[in-house]
Image: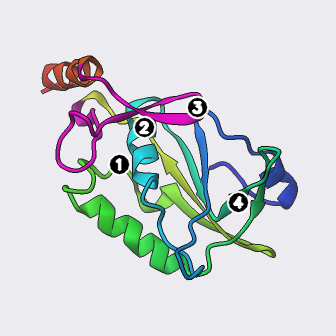
Amino acid sequence: MLGLSSLQTIAQLREGVSIECKLAQGRDGTGALPEDMWETYSAFANTRGGYIFLGLRELPNKRYEVAGVHHPKQVLDALWQGLADRHKVSVNLLHHEDIKIWHLDEGNVISIKVPRAVDKDRPVYLHGSPYGHSYCRRGEADHVCDDHQVQAMLTAQQLTQ
């Protein structure tokens, strides 16, 4: 598991093909699972896996600081509920050991290790339909997979059954 033992480690984080940082604060600032986290979950699962960090604020120089997740249990409950909802996401790839709460002096940070999905689970998609709702990771951004990419993953899925 990628470690967040200090502010220095957080300052060294850079978003990229396998790292995504999210603020994870609701309207009232108490902590909420960001809705766009699901796109990143799909993208990492369909590409090569990666880490999602919740509770980090991006600074103008592309560095991060701890904003904190004020109610991590509430955020994790929302995560597990979403993973169990097949209308939210097609498959749960996570185990409890893939998720860690880092209790830092500046606040809580949640790390989520998303593995690359095996062919039988790909594409990992949102909202009940692989077409238009499957994502892949390019650089530091999540992109909707085009129909050809989705079809290639569905074909590979059928070959494993």
From the viewer's side, name the closer residue of 11 and 9: 11
Mark 4 is surrounded, within 10 Å at the Cα level, by few (under 14), some (14 to 19) or many (20 or more) other residues, namely: some
Q: Examine the rendered structure and indicate whether residue 47 appears above or below residue 61.
A: above
Mark 3 is surrounded, within 10 Å at the Cα level, by few (under 14), some (14 to 19) or many (20 or more) other residues, namely: many
Q: Quadrant of the C terminus?
A: top left
Measure the C-alpha gap from mark 2 to mark 3. 10 Å
x, y percent for residue 151: 20, 21
- The residue pinned by badge 3 equals 17
Q: Examine the rendered structure and indicate whether residue 119 appears above or below residue 44.
A: above
- The residue pinned by badge 4 equals 57
- The residue pinned by badge 2 equals 43
Callout 2 amino acid: Ala
Callout 4 amino acid: Arg
Mark nearer the N terminus (4 vs 1): 4
Q: Is residue 137 magenta?
A: yes
- The residue pinned by badge 1 equals 93
**Residue at disc 3, secondary structure:** loop
Mark nearer the N terminus (2 vs 3): 3
Measure the C-alpha gap from mark 1 to mark 2. 13 Å
Q: Are marks 1 and 2 in contact (CB under 8 Å)?
A: no
x, y percent for residue 77: 40, 74
Mark nearer the N terminus (1 vs 2): 2
Q: Quadrant of residue 88?
A: bottom left
Callout 1 amino acid: Leu
Q: Examine the rendered structure and indicate whether residue 148 appears above or below residue 46.
A: above
Magenta residues span 120-147
Callout 3 amino acid: Val
